[in-house]
Image: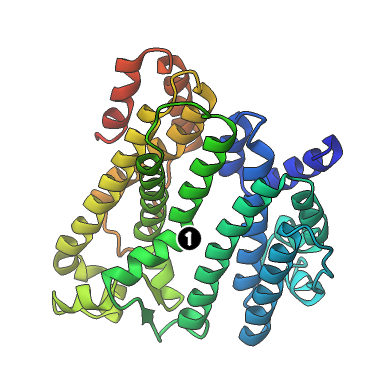
Amino acid sequence: MVGTEFDEMDRLLQQVSRSFYLTLRVLPAAVRPQIGLAYLLARATDTIADTHLVPLERRQAALREMRGAIVTTAAGRTVLLPDFGELAAAHEAPAGQGSHGERLLLETAGRLLEALRSFSREDRQLVCEVLHTITFGQEEDLARFGRAEAGRITALETDEDLDQYTYCVAGCVGEFWTRMCLAHLFRGARLGESTLIAYGIRFGKGLQLVNILRDLPRDLRSGRCYIPRAALADLGLTPKDLLDRAALSRFRPLFQTYLRQAHEHLSTGWAYTEALPYRQVRVRLACAWPLLIGVKTLVRLGGSNVLDDALRIKISRSEIRRLILSSVMRCPFPRAWNRLFDKAGRL
């Protein structure tokens, strides 16, 4: 990728995700363009799926078109870019539903695909594989929740559905991240590739489960429930019951179960950072920051009424700066590094 293309991608990343940009900025140059571009393409397809001002059937068709364009580009062939003008227009201010950055994502999709074409065949294939999984999950999500609305809640059915959802949204990203780093940064390292990939998958699942638990009341009021219906039924609850903050006492045992599951995933993610080559300081820091923010978020969730839609659990920027500084200072010292996760997970 030439410098001007990377600069443009860098500016776009700053607009659509300040939190991920923080992580991306510290990554080694050998993997930063590939991971950054994969993220932008995933955000573009997510923007397509979430553009509610456009009919559901059009969004589903646009997702299929974008996935086909990515597959064709990854194969090294020229592609005729689908027309996303209608979707981009839906993000125009002041009447639009989204941000300026999201509109730019759709308008610059062609340049993103051209950037993908500049990568090696192996890197194109890795990007294609993760985007295939992500867009499959987005299509499944649209099929299930595309017509959901306030007052008519649609829910996942089982824990298996929840596990599949977290894999398609984020677990596959942990797998992609690991495979890309193995290809460019960890060659010759005695890491146990299959174990590291399995840890990376759980890393991603844990971060997504944190998001699900944090966003529960907001999702419920838009008609989406990611807490499985079968698990709720075991407690005599329905998704609609969770709209009442007074239902917390009945819901809490199940919520605590998912908090523990998320913590176990994140703990495995921390073991992932400990398994990385010691010299890969940048990769360890890039992995550590979302894990530390995630486990601190779980602590806050455990002590709040998660059914209260007036509350918004969020780690402040000053806290994030302290986490970053603490991790940078302790990175050279293995024992101090290993204690960071437990410390962040305490009140």
Residue sitting nearer the eye, 38 or 315: 38
Seen at 78% across and 52% down, the residue is 117
Scheme of image coloration: rainbow
From the viewer's perspective, tell me whether residue 56 is left or right of residue 206: right
Say which element carries label 1: helix
- Above or below residue 194? Residue 142 is below
Residue 244: percent from the left, percent from the top? 27, 74
Q: Which residue is mark 1?
A: 169
Residue 85: percent from the left, percent from the top? 82, 73
Residue 31: percent from the left, percent from the top? 63, 36
Residue at the farthest top position = 333
Can residue 163 be seen in the rendering of this structure? Answer: yes
Residue 197: percent from the left, percent from the top? 41, 44
Q: Where, by quadrant of the figure, is residue 83 drawn?
A: bottom right
Seen at 77% across and 54% down, the residue is 112
From the viewer's perspective, tell me whether residue 246 is left or right of residue 199: left
From the viewer's perspective, tell me whether residue 113 is left or right of residue 219: right
Seen at 30% across and 81% down, the residue is 240
